[in-house]
Image: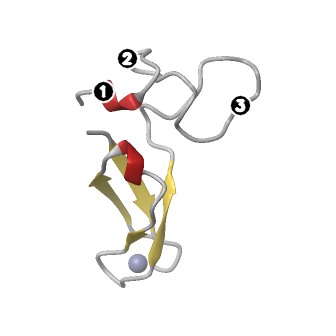
Amino acid sequence: MPIYEYVCPKCDLKFDQLRRLSQADEEASCPRCQNTAKRVLSTFCSFSKDESGLTSSIGGSSCASCSAASCDSCDL
Ligand SMILES: [Zn+2]
């Protein structure tokens, strides 16, 4: 299961959450202030390697760390 990184825009807290890929786009609650935190692209499984300019999310692009089509296969 991939780990996603979230940042709270209110208190600037960064935290990680383990989520299924299907839940990746769901928002998380800040553990400190309960504000809605936004997902940030983590250091792995987030950047597309192709040069087509696709910068959007997971789903379709290959994983940076395992080169699989889906980051679900990352076992980090
Ligand atoms: Zn917060």
Cα distance between the residues tagged 3 and 2: 18 Å
Quarter of the image with the C terminus is top left
Q: Look at mark 1 in the image and give the residue it sits on.
A: 74
Cα distance between the residues tagged 3 and 1: 21 Å
User: Residue at left 36%, top 83%?
Assistant: 34
Ligand 1 neighbours mark 2 (CB distance < 8 Å): no
Disc 1: CA contacts within 10 A as few (<14), some (14-19) or many (>=20): some
Name the kind of residue labelled 2 in the image.
Answer: Cys
Mark nearer the N terminus (3 vs 2): 3
- Most foreground residue, 19 or 8: 19
Q: Is residue 6 left or right of residue 41?
A: left
Q: Which mark is residue 66?
A: 2
Q: Are marks 1 and 2 in contact (CB under 8 Å)?
A: yes
Where residue 16 appears, x then y in whole percent?
Answer: 31, 55
Where residue 72 appears, x then y in whole percent?
Answer: 34, 32
Mark nearer the N terminus (1 vs 2): 2
Q: Look at mark 3 in the image and give the residue it sits on.
A: 54
